[in-house]
Image (spheres, rainbow, N blue to C red):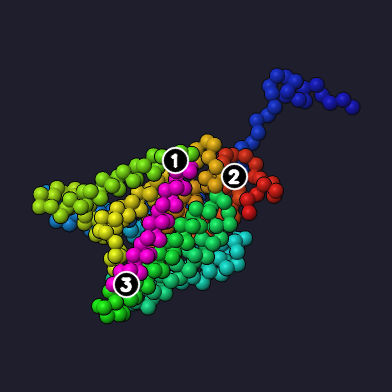
């Protein structure tokens, strides 16, 4: 029996039927990390730096100061709830994913410990006990190191793995410096500052890798994603240094106060101008990493999914705040995000462009 003449729409000049759009792929929870990172950056700028620095800044700014402080407080509370929910979700996903066994066990033990510490910290008005702070910080650092090693095995997540490793090492050195400064006598103050300087330099190296990764995404050595943060950080550093003058303007005083909330203690044995520049550059590079997108013709290592940029942004943002509950929790999220994204082959191919997932031979390992 012959087929009907009108069975094929091609014969009628209509062309082949349009292909159905490819289904969304990848690990769904990773799509929540970039919005969370954007919220974390905004909450850090308003709640940690700008808001506390505006008190008594100038006459006639009472309403503006109150509005900024309220906004910073609200954003911080929303971020804390979102961080707990997102961390618990990523821990559940990681425990059932194909990440290495060390990361699966670490996500439950180390990541769960940080979540529990954040639950204990949320209703308290006073600081957490020192032993709990050390345990929480060490758990977040350990998980970031495990996740960083996992991310190093995948080309498009290698930069995130190096940054997580450096941030984890720098945070560990700073934690040791804090213990030395608190427990030892004053004669060991120089030792604590020296250890803090080593941790500080590890964070600076992480920022340098992040800047190189952002530049590789644009395919140009001098990309706006790196030049703009560097130029703005240099300008704000100059304004902060000018705050020591008697005729300093309001902007200089505000920037210097904000920097004082961003610089860690104990102070490293490094020039104060260098410390100010690094403290201002970190959130600016975090914004650039979150907003960066691969240019056409970029290298394979630069074709990272948005979750990798969000993990880098979170790591830069909390590089010196791992002893804070929200900072430790954000580092846990950054580590788990990098580890999960490194195993998310479909998410990487979605970053390149819509289409069918790669075959097993082409899948990155």
Circles 1 and 3: CB atoms closer than 8 Å: no
Q: Out of 296 and 181, give the one closest to the viewer.
A: 181
Of label 1 and label 3, which has the lower sequence position? 3
Q: Residues within 10 Å of mark 3 (few under 14, many from 20)?
A: many
Image quadrant occupied by the C terminus: bottom right
Residue at point 32%, 72% (across, down): 192
Q: Nearer the viewer, residue 309 or 222?
A: 222
Where is residue 89? Give x, y as percent: 51, 61
Residue projecting furthest to the top: 13
- Residue at the image point whose x is 35% and y is 69% from the top: 195
Instruction: Return the residue nearer the eye: 44 or 248.
Output: 248
Q: Residue at x 40, y 46 (%)?
A: 288
Main secondary structure of the magenta stretch: helix
How far, Cα to Cα, is label 1 from label 3?
37 Å
Query: In the rendered structure, which disc, 2 or 1, sits on the residue that comes first in sequence?
Result: 1
Using the image, determine if residue 268 lies above or below residue 4. below
Give, as a single range, the part of the protein colored magenta: 190-218
Q: Which residue is label 3 attached to?
A: 192
Q: Position of residue 1 (x, y in %)?
A: 89, 27
Which residue lies under the disc numbered 2? 349
Residue 166 — which label? Answer: none
User: In the image, residue 232 lies at what x, y percent?
Assistant: 30, 45
Residue 97 colored magenta?
Answer: no
Q: Report the mark closest to the observer, 3 or 2.
A: 3
């Amino acid at each position: 029996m012959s087929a009907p003449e009108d069975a094929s729409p091609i014969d009628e000049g209509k062309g082949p039927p349009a292909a159905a759009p490819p289904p969304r792929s990848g690990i769904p929870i990773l799509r929540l990390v970039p919005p969370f990172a954007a919220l974390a950056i905004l909450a850090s700028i308003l709640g940690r730096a700008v808001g506390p620095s505006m008190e008594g800044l100038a006459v006639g700014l009472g309403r503006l100061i109150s509005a900024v402080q309220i906004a910073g407080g609200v954003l911080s509370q929303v971020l804390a709830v979102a961080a707990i929910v997102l961390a618990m979700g990523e821990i559940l996903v990681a425990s059932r994913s194909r990440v290495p066994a060390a990361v699966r066990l670490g996500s439950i033990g180390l990541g769960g410990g940080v979540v529990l510490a954040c639950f204990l910290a949320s209703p308290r008005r006073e600081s957490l006990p020192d032993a709990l702070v050390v345990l929480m910080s060490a758990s977040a650092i350990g998980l970031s190191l495990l996740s960083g090693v996992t991310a190093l095995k995948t080309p498009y997540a290698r930069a995130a793995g190096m940054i997580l490793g450096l941030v984890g090492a720098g945070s560990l050195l700073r934690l040791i410096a804090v213990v030395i400064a608190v427990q030892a006598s004053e004669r060991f103050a120089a030792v604590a500052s020296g250890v803090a300087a080593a941790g500080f330099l590890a964070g600076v190296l992480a920022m340098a890798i992040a800047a190189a990764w952002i530049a590789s995404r644009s395919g140009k050595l001098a990309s706006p994603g790196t030049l703009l943060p560097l130029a703005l950080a240099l300008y704000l550093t100059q304004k902060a240094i000018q705050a020591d003058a008697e005729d300093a303007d309001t902007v200089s005083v505000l920037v210097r106060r904000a920097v004082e909330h961003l610089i860690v203690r104990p102070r490293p044995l490094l020039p104060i101008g260098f410390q100010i520049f690094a403290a201002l550059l970190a959130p600016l590079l975090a914004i650039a990493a979150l907003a960066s997108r691969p240019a056409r013709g970029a290298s394979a290592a630069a074709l990272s999914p948005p979750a990798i940029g969000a993990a880098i942004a979170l790591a830069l943002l909390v590089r010196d705040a791992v002893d804070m509950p929200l900072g430790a929790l954000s580092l846990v999220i950054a580590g788990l995000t990098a580890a999960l994204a490194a195993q998310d082959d479909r998410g990487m191919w979605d970053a390149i462009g819509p289409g069918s997932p790669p075959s097993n031979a082409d899948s990155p390992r």
